[in-house]
Image: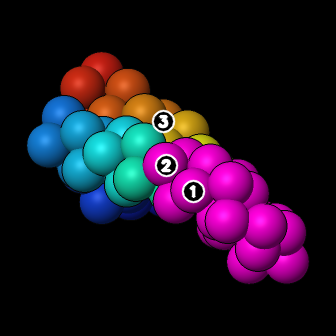
């Protein structure tokens, strides 16, 4: 397998915090009736969730190396 940059639990925590913030922003935008902006934030949330899965994979791979 190719080399992988190690990740830390702090990396995962930072991403999870950003997902929480994005979720709150999406909810507030929905309440304000800004549906287009809420959809854009939802898309950003999906990207951040993918980043979280990726960092978890990096943590697993580097712990067993």
Query: Residue tagged by mark 2?
Result: 24
The residue nearer to you, when weighing 49 against 2, is 49
The residue nearer to you, when weighing 36 against 11, is 36
Secondary element at tag 1: helix
Q: Which of pointers 1 and 3 indicates the residue nearer the eye? A: 1
Secondary element at tag 3: helix
Q: Which mark is residue 57?
A: 3
Is residue 40 found left or right of 12 in the rendered image? Answer: right
Label 1 – label 2 distance at C-alpha: 6 Å
Q: Residues within 10 Å of mark 2 (few under 14, many from 20)?
A: few
Q: Residues within 10 Å of mark 1 (few under 14, many from 20)?
A: few
Query: Residue tagged by mark 1?
Result: 28
Q: Residue at x 68, y 54 (%)?
A: 31
Q: Which of pointers 2 and 3 indicates the residue nearer the eye? A: 2
Is residue 11 found left or right of 15 in the rendered image? Answer: left
Is residue 23 found left or right of 64 in the rendered image? Answer: right
Q: Residue at x 76, y 74 (%)?
A: 34
Magenta extent: 23-47
Q: Residue at x 24, y 26 (%)?
A: 63
């Amino acid at each position: 397998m190719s080399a992988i940059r190690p990740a830390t639990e702090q990396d995962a925590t930072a991403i999870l915090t950003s997902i929480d913030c994005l979720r709150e922003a999406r909810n507030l935008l929905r309440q304000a009736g800004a549906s287009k902006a809420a959809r854009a934030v939802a898309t950003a949330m999906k990207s951040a969730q993918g980043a979280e899965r990726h960092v978890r994979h990096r943590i697993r791979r580097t712990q067993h190396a």
